[in-house]
Image: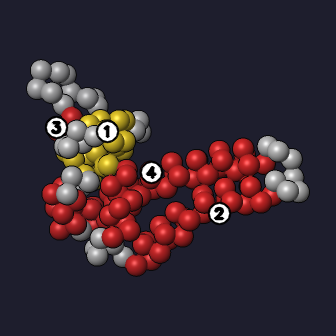
Amino acid sequence: MSRLPDFVAPRTDGTLARYRWKAISGVLYAVDQERSEDVLAKHPGVPPPTRVAHRFWSVVPALVLIGGLVALVWLPWYTPVIGFFLAYGLLRAMKAVAANWVADLSERDPGFLAQMLQLAVIREKSAFQPANERPWPP
């Protein structure tokens, strides 16, 4: 199966969210990337090494921005611009990695998957498919 693209869709409360397709135990689910970050930060079912790694990498983009501004004293004007784009890329990557970790934890622990489905962090493929349209993804 080829990698399916991330997509934006409404949540159950009507706000928009970026989702990532993941196959968990042979079933295709969509994982909410922003809510995945909250789960990794606060859920008691997340292993401590995963939580610590997520916290560490969530601080790195801020340090890159600050470092770019401080380096402005010695380096050319475009240094903070490069730092901004690096920080933005790191933030996007952190959300995608958080979704992958939540999917991996859900695959290992069926109880965790049930909790994520209940919290709407993970949604089934059928939740995004109107009955009168052809199935997507193929």
Q: Is residue 28 visible?
A: no
Which residue is disc 4 drawn over? Answer: 96
Q: Residue at x 74, y 49 (%)?
A: 80
Mark pair 3, 2: CA separation: 40 Å
Which quadrant would residue 85 be assigned to in this image? top right
Q: Pick whichever of labels 4 and 2 is earlier in the sequence.
A: 2
Which residue is disc 3 drawn over? Answer: 126
Q: Element at badge 1?
A: strand
Task: Single out the mark in the foreground, 4 or 2.
Answer: 2
Query: Are discs 4 and 1 less than 8 Å apart at CB?
Result: no
Q: Element at badge 4?
A: helix
Which residue is disc 2 drawn over? Answer: 63
Mark pair 3, 1: CA separation: 17 Å
Q: Is residue 129 left or right of residue 102?
A: left
Q: Pick whichever of labels 4 and 1 is earlier in the sequence.
A: 1
- Residue 125 percent coordinates (x, y): 21, 40
- Vertical relation: 64 (above or below) 76: below
